Image: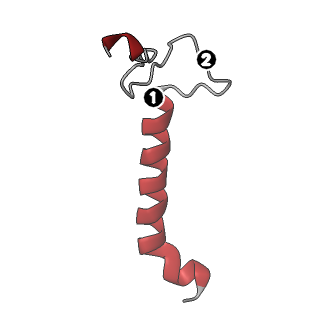
Amino acid sequence: MAQNRISMPSGTGGLVRYFDDYKSKISIQPVHVIVFIILVILVIILLQIFGVSLLGF
């Protein structure tokens, strides 16, 4: 009865392998992100101060 065993191929156990050779077409440096965040904060502050007179709300 031991002769009738079916051998299953070994799997990866649900693990996914990611390779580091992928290069994105869009490359953003961390300095650019920080400058963009600072600009957004400045725009929000300026709108809080001058927004009523500029937009008329």
- Taking the spot 48% from the left edge, 49% from the top edge, the residue there is 39
Q: What is the secondary structure assignment of the residue under circle 2?
A: loop
User: Which quadrant of the structure image shows residue 24?
Assistant: top right
Q: Give how far across and how far down residue 4 sits, in percent.
A: 40, 16
Residue shown at the point (36%, 24%) measured from the top left: 13
Disc assigned to residue 11: none
Position of 23 with respect to 2 (left or right) is right
Q: How is the image coloured?
A: secondary structure
Place residue 30 in its image quadrant. top left
Q: Label 1: few (<14), some or many (≥20) within 10 Å?
A: few
Q: Residue at the location (44% across, 55% down)?
A: 42
Q: Which residue is mark 1?
A: 31
Q: Amino acid at mark 2?
A: Lys
Q: Secondary structure at mark 1?
A: helix
Provide residue 2's location: percent of width, then percent of height.
31, 13
- Write down the residue under mark 2: 23
Could you tell me which quadrant the N terminus lies in?
top left
Pick the front one: 15 or 18 = 15
Q: Nearer the viewer, mark 1 or mark 2?
A: 2
Q: Amino acid at mark 1?
A: Val
Name the residue rendered at 44%, 46% in the picture. 37
The total of numbered circles placed on residues is 2
From the viewer's side, name the closer residue of 52 and 20: 20
How much space separates mark 1 and mark 2, taking CA atoms?
Answer: 19 Å
